[in-house]
Image (cartoon, helix red, strand yellow):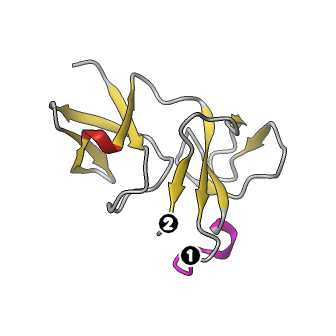
Amino acid sequence: MAILFARLQANVPIKMRRGAWYRVIELTDLQAVIEVNHRKVGVLRAWLEIQQRPPQQWSVVHGSAENRKAPPHLRGTYGVCPNCRARAPLPKGARTHECARCRREFEINWTEGTVVKDSE
């Protein structure tokens, strides 16, 4: 099997970061086993977007502004770095953003076809 990557494409009841890409370990007709924090996690394939390589752009996550579990700067819309998976608030209208963790700059995918929703 070629190396594949997956991320959640919908608001589903599973503890994974919305917008982050994970390596696919195993793939069947119904499920994918992905690596999350060095652990194998089985996820229904219908819940995932699967690609041969993750895009090199910030994933935009539209979270809930009322989510009290999230840090204040990550309530509402935020981005997920394609390189290190760090989450960060995104400047409105910016075309690119530099990640504070890995210091790499990437374009922001504001027009992404499947915008990831987060309600946790």
Going from N to C along the chain, the mark reached first, 2 or 1, is: 1
- Given residues 96 and 7, the one toward you in this image is 7
Q: Residue at x 41, y 42 (%)?
A: 7
> Which residue in the protein does label 2 denote?
119
> In the picture shown, does residue 102 fall above or below 1?
below
Q: Which three-letter amino acid code belongs to the residue tagged 1?
A: Asn
Q: Quadrant of residue 37?
A: bottom left
> Which residue in the protein does label 1 denote?
67
Q: Residue at x 78, y 37 (%)?
A: 96
The answer to if 20 sits in the magenta stretch is no
Left or right: 114 with respect to 8? Answer: right
Element at label 2: loop
Q: Residue at x 51, y 47 (%)?
A: 19
* Label 2 packing within 10 angstroms: few (<14), some (14-19), many (20+): some
The answer to if 73 sits in the magenta stretch is yes
**Marks 2 and 1 in Cβ contact (< 8 Å):** yes
- Given residues 106 and 29, the one toward you in this image is 29
